């Protein structure tokens, strides 16, 4: 009897150990990709996000705790297109993890699976923080995000084929809900079509294109260069002649320049989270973007 109990306990422990090992360890560079992995992976994934929506993903430190996470990861999911160029190469090198290096199944860059906008025609640092491949913020376009979701689901299946059915079910569920919400957002944002906006940084071009917004100015004199008094003065003159409808900036960016221009012109400011909050779904995050833009336009 005792022997039977021991065997049962050993089998139970072995089963539990196997279940733990089956869980895919994922390192997501940005919150949007962490949220997407959770939607597609469900109980089969354990996700750690390297950044929050209150951080500029261009400028992150490859700190020891992050290196430790990278060392244990089965899958790395990032935006790519040089968004993480300042810290990801160092992180990968120090992690020593062969599974998440470029060219391996566990290396996933979202920008590799969609057509990018705003490709640099001149690779010269005098033009500011330009991305040679194109703008990396592809998650701001619902249609591109869905293409990334499809590719990411296939990557999860390749890494964990035993759970292929679960991943396919999750993708189908996500796709149907995302398409339904997309139709809702289209109707909700008809009033935004052809409205003019000033942005802090050129982070929003995919959202602009999807909604039909026209960018008529930027608070940064050049991408990645903080606003200067001379540039803001020039922008002020232009806005007084042809006012914009909104001034948009991300929650992690300094609001001082946006509020200054708003006070001088009467153009309202809109602070947006460029990525989901911790634990926030992509659906809720994108709905919040839409709600804030539509509310400010009224």
Image (cartoon, helix red, strand yellow):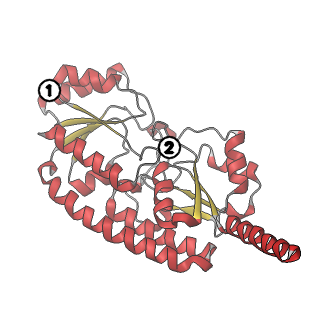
Q: Position of residue 192 (x, y in %)?
A: 16, 48
- The correct choice, above or below, for 143 with respect to 231 in the image is below
Q: Return the mark for residue 105.
A: none
Question: Is the N terminus in the top left, top right, bottom left or bottom right quadrant?
Answer: bottom right
Q: Position of residue 152 (x, y in %)?
A: 50, 68
Q: Which residue is mark 2?
A: 124
Q: CA distance from mark 2 to mark 1?
A: 32 Å
Determine if residue 29 is in view. yes
x 21%, y 20%: residue: 263
Q: Which residue is mark 1?
A: 240
- The correct choice, above or below, for 263 with respect to 11 in the image is above
Q: Quadrant of residue 62?
A: top right
x 25%, y 48%: residue: 290
Q: Position of residue 82 (x, y in %)?
A: 53, 51
Question: Is the C terminus in the top left, top right, bottom left or bottom right quadrant?
Answer: top left
Say few, some or many: other residues with alpha carbon within 10 Å of mark 1 (under 14 / 14 to 19 / 20 or more).
few
Q: Position of residue 93 (x, y in %)?
A: 73, 51
* Mark earlier in primary sequence (2, 1): 2
């Amino acid at each position: 009897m005792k022997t039977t109990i021991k065997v049962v306990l050993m089998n139970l422990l072995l089963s539990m150990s196997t279940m733990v090992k089956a869980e895919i360890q994922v390192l997501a560079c940005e919150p949007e990709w962490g949220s997407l992995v959770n939607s597609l992976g469900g109980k089969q994934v354990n996700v750690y996000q390297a950044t929050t929506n209150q951080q500029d993903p261009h400028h992150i430190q490859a700190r020891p705790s992050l290196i430790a996470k990278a060392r244990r990861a089965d899958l790395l999911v990032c935006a790519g297109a040089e968004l993480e160029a300042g810290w990801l190469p160092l992180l990968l090198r120090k992690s020593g993890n062969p599974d998440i290096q470029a060219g391996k199944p566990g290396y996933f860059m979202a920008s590799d699976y969609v057509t990018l906008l705003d490709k640099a025609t001149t690779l010269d640092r005098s033009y500011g923080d330009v991305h040679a491949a194109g703008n990396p913020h592809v998650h701001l376009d619902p249609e591109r995000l869905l293409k990334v979701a499809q590719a990411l689901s296939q990557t999860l299946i390749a890494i964990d084929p035993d759970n292929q059915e679960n991943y396919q079910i999750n993708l189908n569920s996500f796709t149907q809900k995302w398409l339904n919400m997309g139709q809702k957002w289209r109707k909700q944002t008809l009033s935004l079509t052809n409205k003019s906006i000033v942005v802090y940084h050129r982070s929003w071009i995919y959202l602009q294109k999807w909604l039909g917004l026209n960018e008529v100015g930027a608070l940064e004199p050049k991408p990645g260069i903080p606003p200067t008094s001379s540039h803001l003065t020039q922008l002020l003159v232009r806005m007084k002649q042809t006012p914009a409808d909104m001034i948009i900036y991300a929650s992690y960016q300094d609001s001082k320049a946006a509020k200054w221009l708003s006070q001088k012109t009467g153009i309202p400011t809109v602070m947006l989270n460029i990525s989901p909050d911790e634990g926030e779904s992509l659906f809720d995050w994108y709905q919040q973007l839409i709600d804030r833009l539509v509310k400010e336009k009224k």
